[in-house]
Amino acid sequence: MIRHLFIVNPKAGVKSPVEEITERIRRAFILNTDRENEKYEILLTQKKGDATEFARAACREPYEKTRIYACGGDGTLHEVINGVVGADSVAVCPVPVGSGNDFIRTLEGFSKEDFLDLSACIRGTEIPCDVLRCGDVYSLNSISVGLDAITARRQNRIKKLPLISGGAAYKISLGYTFLSSMNNPVSFEVDGEALSVGNGSVTLAVVANGRYYGGGFKAAPLAEINDGLMDFVTIHSLSRMEFLRYVKDYKEGKHLETVPDIYFTRCKRIRLLSEKPLCLQADGEIFQMENPEIEIIPAAVRLVLPAR
């Protein structure tokens, strides 16, 4: 028998999702006679890090199989993933009731509504999914530095304002960041080889497992979540006028063909080098690290896709 654990972030999205999720769970289990005897549990997070602790505790419990439903946005999913990496008996299903929900955009063929159909998720299939690791931080979607990381740091503050969604908060933050420096001093080693791009300065660089971030920007349009490789995209220092010219292409995933002085490769390991600690974003979460190293961990988690 599968244990179903719903980890719910009450602060996700513009309106608390607790009532909505509770009703969806009720319809999926209590009103479904095929599931009425299956065990499920709902846990509400109260503070940052709770979802990780709940997930880790679930991995230690002696169930043959556990499915954790990360009910929130990309931040809630990020926390859950950090609690389950390497646990063979645990699978994770995103339930997108947050403000951004970028990761599920990569799962083409599935809509947000598909992942909100808990009956379909309960009956869903599992696939292996790669994860990025940077120090002791795991990222399901992407890790970035430069303009977008600075933007994400501002976004986390702005999206707390009333009636501001994740996508709108990102755009507002991007406007503020546009007025600051477009040059970020950082160089790279890719799979052990020094990379000579950007003269030691870039506008942004993204290491990606998923394709989207920032409320719908298709930063890594060719990324695959289970190919054992991470996609690395770096854009050299752009002027503000160049940035305005290409930001639409960046959002639509056309930048690999249109933006000048862009570098793209697939690799297994990247080291970021800078004289000062770097501001990084991982799935929208912000942290600082000196000369961080990022690597891909193949098939590190199991991901649930809704049944058709």
Image (cartoon, helix red, strand yellow):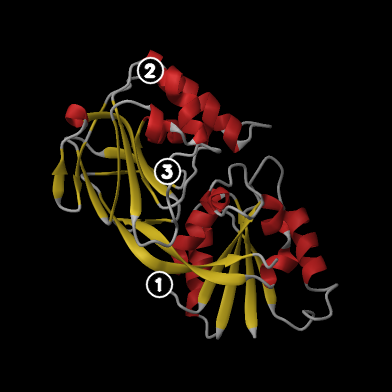
- Gap between marks 1 and 3, in whole Å? 25 Å
Amino acid on which disc 1 is placed:
Gly
**N-term-proximal mark, 2 vs 3:** 3
Q: Quadrant of residue 272?
A: top left
Amino acid on which disc 2 is placed:
Glu
Residue drawn at 27 percent across, 57 percent down: 268
Residue drawn at 72 percent across, 81 percent down: 38
Residue 153 visible to an observer of this rendering: yes
User: What residue does disc 3 label?
Assistant: 220
Residue drawn at 41 percent across, 32 percent down: 255
Number of the label disc, if any, that sits on residue 242: 2
Residue 160 visible to an observer of this rendering: no
Residue 179 higher or lower than 256, as above or below: above
Asked whether, in this view, residue 249 is left or right of residue 165, the answer is left
Q: Nearer the viewer, residue 22 or 118?
A: 118
Task: Report x, y in % for residue 67.
Answer: 59, 72
Task: Report x, y in % for residue 194.
Answer: 14, 43
User: What residue does disc 1 label?
Assistant: 86
- Gap between marks 2 and 1, in whole Å? 43 Å
Q: Secondary structure at mark 3?
A: loop
Q: Secondary structure at mark 2?
A: helix
Asked whether, in this view, residue 240 is left or right of residue 261, the answer is right
How packed is label 3: few (under 14 Cα within 10 Å), some, or many (20 or more)? many
